[in-house]
């Protein structure tokens, strides 16, 4: 077969796949802008009430980049990140077994927004050894349908993918659920054996820079937490 005969099929595939991914990227970016809007609204709506109850409790919003927004409340920070690439699920993933995907395989291509929970003091005191946790990730396809993979209050079921649309109301629910999970996800004392040895050089630096990790479940497998 003449190589030139393959060219139309190649270009057709390039255009079809490229157009699909660009559409999903734009849908995800618009969804992420709505995340920023909702987070800012939650902060502005509640900041005064929180401040009146206790001035030591902060509620803050920081729009860091086009693909990152930060929300601080009391001792916690939530960081929302939009990935700039488009993903498809493996054939073994549960979502691939749903009727919604079997009807149209293009629905399985998704943008991804992840939610990370950190301790506010980790950033305040520049504790570079501290750890955070991914508590959820949102997948959104070209039709603006979405589902969540996450912990407890944050997670959703795959079979809702066909009916769940990512809009202002659903995004507010996601953000508030992530906040609630983070508030209830308490800091536990690190195992004693992990902290009993400290070198002279470590003790000579300031406490903020000591190479001792702090995390809410340090020493435990986060993915073993009950859902």
Image: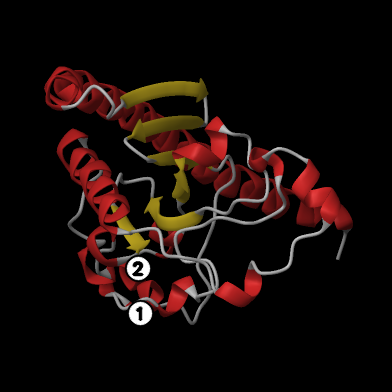
Of the 4 image quadrants, the one containing the C terminus is bottom left
- Does residue 191 lie above or below 104 as drawn? below
Which of the 4 image quadrants contains residue 61? top left
Q: Is 196 situated left or right of 172 in this image?
A: right
On residue 97, the disc is 1
Neighbour class for label 1 at 10 Å: few (<14), some, many (≥20)?
few
Question: In which image quadrant can residue 173 be found?
Answer: top left
Dot 2: element: helix
Closer to the camera, 29 or 202?
202
- Residue 108, position as x, y percentages in the image: 43, 61
Report the Cα–Cα distance between label 1 and label 2. Answer: 7 Å
Tally of marks: 2
Relative to residue 181, is residue 12 drawn left or right? right
Q: Above or below — where is 162 with respect to 168?
A: below
Q: Secondary structure at mark 1?
A: helix
Q: Image height check: is 38 above or below 23?
A: above
One can see residue 113 in this view: no
* Residue 53 x, y percent position in the rendering: 12, 26
**Residues marked 1 and 2 touching at CB (< 8 Å):** yes
Viewer-side residue, 152 vs 47? 47
Find disc 2 in the rendering and name its residue: 101
Residue 45 versus residue 74 in the image, above or below:
above
> Where's residue 46, x and y in %?
16, 24
Which of the labelled discs sits on residue 112, or is there none?
none
Describe residue 19's horizontal placement relative to residue 40 as left or right: right
Residue at image location 53% in from the left, 37% down from the top: 22
Quarter of the picture holding the N terminus? bottom right
């Amino acid at each position: 077969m003449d190589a030139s005969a393959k060219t139309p099929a190649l270009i057709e595939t390039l255009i079809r796949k490229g157009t699909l991914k660009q559409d999903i990227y734009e849908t995800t970016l618009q969804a992420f802008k709505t995340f920023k809007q909702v987070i800012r609204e939650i902060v502005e709506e509640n900041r005064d009430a929180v401040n009146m109850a206790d001035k030591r409790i902060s509620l803050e919003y920081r729009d860091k980049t086009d693909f990152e927004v930060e929300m601080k409340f009391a001792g916690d920070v939530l960081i929302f990140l939009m990935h700039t690439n488009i993903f498809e699920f493996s054939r073994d993933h549960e979502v691939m077994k749903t009727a919604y995907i079997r009807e149209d395989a293009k629905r399985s291509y998704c943008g991804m927004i992840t939610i990370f929970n950190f301790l506010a003091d980790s950033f305040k005191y520049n504790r570079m050894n501290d750890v955070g946790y991914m508590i959820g990730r949102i997948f959104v396809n070209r039709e603006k349908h979405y589902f969540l993979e996450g912990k407890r209050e944050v997670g959703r079921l795959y079979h809702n993918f066909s009916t769940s649309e990512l809009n202002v109301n659903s995004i507010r629910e996601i953000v508030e659920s992530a906040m609630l999970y983070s508030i209830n996800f308490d800091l536990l004392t690190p195992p004693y054996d992990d902290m009993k040895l400290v070198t002279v050089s470590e003790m000579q630096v300031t406490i903020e820079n000591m190479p001792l990790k702090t995390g809410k479940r340090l020493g435990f497998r986060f993915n073993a937490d009950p859902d």
